[in-house]
Amino acid sequence: MHLQPRPSIYIVLSLAVFGNVKCQTEIFERCCYAEESVPHGTVVFSHPQRCFQIICQNGRLIPTYVNQKGDQNCCEFNGRLTPNGKELGGHCMIMKCDAGIWKPSGKIEDCCSRCSLYDDPHITTLDGTKYDWHRRCNYSVTQTSYTTEPDVGVFSKFQGCNVIASCLSQTTFRNDPNAIISLDHGDVTTVKVNGYDYLVQSQASQVKSQDGKLPVLAWTHENCIFLMGSSKLLILHCPHRLDIWAHPFHTEKLNGLCGHYNGAPEDDFTDRYERVHALSYWPLAFPHSWLTPEQSDFQCDVWCPECLEETTVDPCQANPERRKYFEALCREPLKHLQDTEDFDHYMKTCAFDLCAIYQRGGNETNARNWVRDVERMIAVVKDF
């Protein structure tokens, strides 16, 4: 079979400039490309291996090289080329371009804040407030503004577990209206991208949909998946755990179960109707307000008058001596993690989990197995 040689970037440029006979525009800032009118700043053609792009600039298609002409093996993300050996910041995880391949540095930018949900679930907001929320159904974990149709957001479904609690079941990351990625907390390799299956690899790469590449980098990490979006949200999705890092770009913009993000925890419990609730370890009205309009379980559509109350109570019925026993079961397996941030909080929440297990009729074997799971949940994020 005879293979035709691939056209050079100069031929492509010629076609881009002179081949658009059907496109006409009288707007100076727009360009004609592939019979379409594109706005100023649009990258109409990109060749990362040669560090070359064609960009619409004030009505003209301009050939652009990163650094110097002849450089090779650049990395591309969200229309931007990064030279080989250079780092990309501004998206919470620092990425390095290594011969055309993105390599996660493992370093989270100091300016970014983290929200975490783990177990059943225990939540720490972006501003550091800790609380428990054990209801089922679908919720906005974090999203832009207060609307029910945000451009950017993370949404999770919680299903019943441990009788008195609920565990993460599914999560959806909306990087933008055209890039929606769904994750199942029982699957740590395959996600759905705009409704289609996508297998995440160990090597960081731009997520692909039926319509092409999306401005989201994805890669596996141990038994988890990282998603880094152009929206400046970084997602770490693991069994029984979800972590979200937000760039300061989102200050005063994000709301949901992860709180009102502004560096001031006093107004963390701002509900969907922009009302601020008092902080409590067992809130009710605040998290309940962040139910999403779409619910797959018909029971989630039932009106809940008790959910209008400000707070609820600790569902663990164990007395103080019994709680100390639960803490003792947690302490030994977790002691090598005691230098991690919030170790005391991990101990407290681990003891609560064991209380839930025993209240459902579990035994010490069930309890010790769960503590091992908790250990893994902590260990996977202790370096971030």
Image: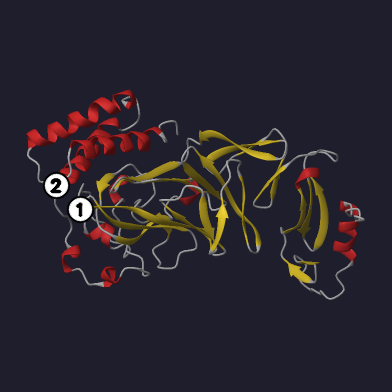
Residue 350, percent from left and from top: 24, 38
Q: Secondary structure at mark 2?
A: helix
Q: Secondary structure at mark 1?
A: loop
For the point 72% across and 36% down, the residue is 99
Residue underneath mark 2: 359
Which image quadrant: the C terminus? top left
Q: Amino acid at mark 1?
A: Val
Residue underneath mark 1: 163
* 110 sits left or right of 264 in the view: right
* 131 sits left or right of 216 in the view: left
Q: Residues within 10 Å of mark 2 (few under 14, many from 20)?
A: some
Q: Is residue 101 above or below residue 17?
A: above
Q: Residues within 10 Å of mark 1 (few under 14, many from 20)?
A: few
Q: Quadrant of residue 343?
A: top left
For the point 83% across and 52% down, the residue is 63
Which image quadrant: the N terminus? bottom right
Q: Amino acid at mark 2?
A: Gln
Residue 249, percent from left and from top: 50, 49
